[in-house]
Image (spheres, rainbow, N blue to C red):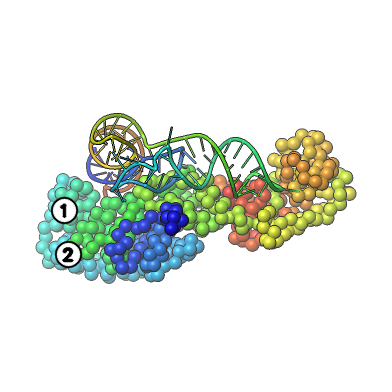
Amino acid sequence: MPEKRVEERRGLPDLPDIHEYKTIVTRFAPNPNGPLHMGHVRAALLSHEYSRRYKGKFILRFEDTNPENAMLEMYELIKRDLRWLGISWDEEYYQSDRVEIYYAHAEELIREGKAYVCECDVENFRKLRDSGLPCPCRNLTASENLSRWRKMLAGGYDEGRAVVRIKTDLSHPNPAVRDWPALRIVTKSHPRVGGKYLVWPLYNFSTGIDDHLMGVTHVIRGKEHEINEERQRAMYAHFGWKYPTAVQYGRLSMPGVELSKTQTMQMVRSGNLQGFDDVRLATIAALRRRGFLPAAIRQLIFDIGLTPVDSSLSWETLYAYNRKFLDPVANRYFFVANPVKLLVHNAPKFKEVRLRLHPSKPEMGERVLPIVIENDSPVFYVAKDDMATLRVGDIFRLKDLMNVKLERLAPVFEASFHSLEVMDVPKFQWVSAGAVVLEVIKPDASVETGLAEPSVAALNVGDIVQLERYGFVRIDSTSPKLIAVYTHK
RNA sequence: GCUCCGGUGGUGUAGGCCGGUCAAACAUGCAGGCCUCUCGAGCCUGCGCCCCGGGUUCAAAUCCCGGCCGGAGCACCA
């Protein structure tokens, strides 16, 4: 019993009002106008997790009611990202397939005098709204509004000339919720449904209606939606619906990382970034490419939890979480960045050495590092930076092999054999025969080239390994060149 | 400017609704040690926090008021 308490403390808190509903229903409702990033994933993971905890239902709903920015390729990318994160959904909807439903509800409100078609110039409307006054259209009869509505649907208005507004209390303290717009005219063709519709619902209208129709019980969303909740509540009152339980969380930021979708899209288009999975981004696609594990991202998001306070997340924290999951499963290999040649004289003529793939898990197997011998001396490549720490006469160890004494720095590094047994001297990774060229893309998108031990050539794209004393790395491509992406230390 | 919301170690969270058991917990970070043929992992020790000021109370991180600071929104985007 006491242990259970501790368990519960460490996990997510319970959702409010869970006993008011027989089945808990949550949803994730992305706009397919850009790639998913850490900020979105928070809503997705939390919503999904709660639906599973309470054995409820989880809905994926694409909110693509703005033909101006919906992107066809994003639907699949988003689904792929979600699946990768371990998220499965029970129902899948596209708002662009539900336009008729929104029309029916709009018409109902208009007929009942709870909404009206406004032909006012936006600026005039705002002026009136801000002083709490109705615009001329508001007082039209229901039948006048109905004919305006039919005119809208029939294409009788140009873009921007008419909008359906939901009536609210004009004295609401926040002008932004007064008579908010629910549907507008967009002539641009929609990437999924083409030019089928001219009238498109705005966010609050379609989201509000869908949440009710789909039986959503808990809406988990960022606090930037607080005002939207108020707007939607006004509409729910018109329909006589009960508003779901809303939970909001604060903004998630990552210092030095661009999370904004519009900014990201711009940089991708302008060529400043190489794609949605550019290593400098915190999109899910980029994190996957860099070698982050879904489990690490899930754990981190759950630990951040549901607070309404803003939180800023550093890469360091992300690294720490990922390392915890990666370290036990990643194979180890030798890699030397910026290699320099090293000759060792008078050394035993080893042809190869067998090493564990994981230092504390012999069951993971071994790999072989062959050694080439030229003119009676074994030849190695070691990292330039490592050699820079030494002076002539210093003793160092070629890790897992032998200790040597540095004899001369030029024209090539030369050392003499010292001993075999492990000594308390610097230990450097090395490669020799069969080493393969490996390019590593660093987090700032720069590239470092080096030599990796032969076994690295047999790795597959997607494998995440540790290059000892260098860092974790995910194999990004194997041909024509062997390229890895640096994950973190 | 207006309307909301929030402020716990460097960072991320727990605790706050139901004041005392909170000179405050966990993770990460940083410092040191142990271990290890990796500058990784693991283990141990240490550092470090209740925004400020009043009030209520025997007692406040927790309740109230004020201030300061931060955030969100004020789109015919989502």
Residue A383's disc is: none
Viewer-closest of A436 and B21: B21
Q: Quadrant of residue A325?
A: bottom right
For discs 2 and 1, the disc positioned in front in the rendered view: 1
CA gap, disc 2 and disc 1: 16 Å
Residue drawn at point x = 21 percent, y = 60 percent? A235
Under circle 2, the secondary element is helix
Which residue is identified by label 1?
A169
Residue drawn at the location 16% of the way across and 61% of the way down = A114
Which of the 4 image quarters holds residue A481?
Answer: bottom right
Who's the residue at 69% across and 50% down the image? A335
Tell me which amino acid carries mark 1.
Asp
Q: Position of residue A271 (x, y in %)?
A: 50, 51
Q: Quadrant of the N terminus of chain A?
A: bottom left
Residue A110's disc number: 2
Vertical position of residue A98 compared to residue A35: above or below:
below
Q: Amino acid at mark 2?
A: Ile
Q: Residue A427, how many percent across, how many down? A: 73, 44
Q: Quadrant of residue A184?
A: bottom left
Q: Residues within 10 Å of mark 2 (few under 14, many from 20)?
A: many
How far from the left and from the top, in percent, is residue A423?
77, 42
The reply to whether label 2 and label 1 mark residues of one chain is yes
Q: Is residue A405 left or right of residue A312?
A: right
Give how far across and how far down residue A407 sits, in percent: 83, 37
Considering only vertical position in the picture, is B37 above or below A191?
Answer: above
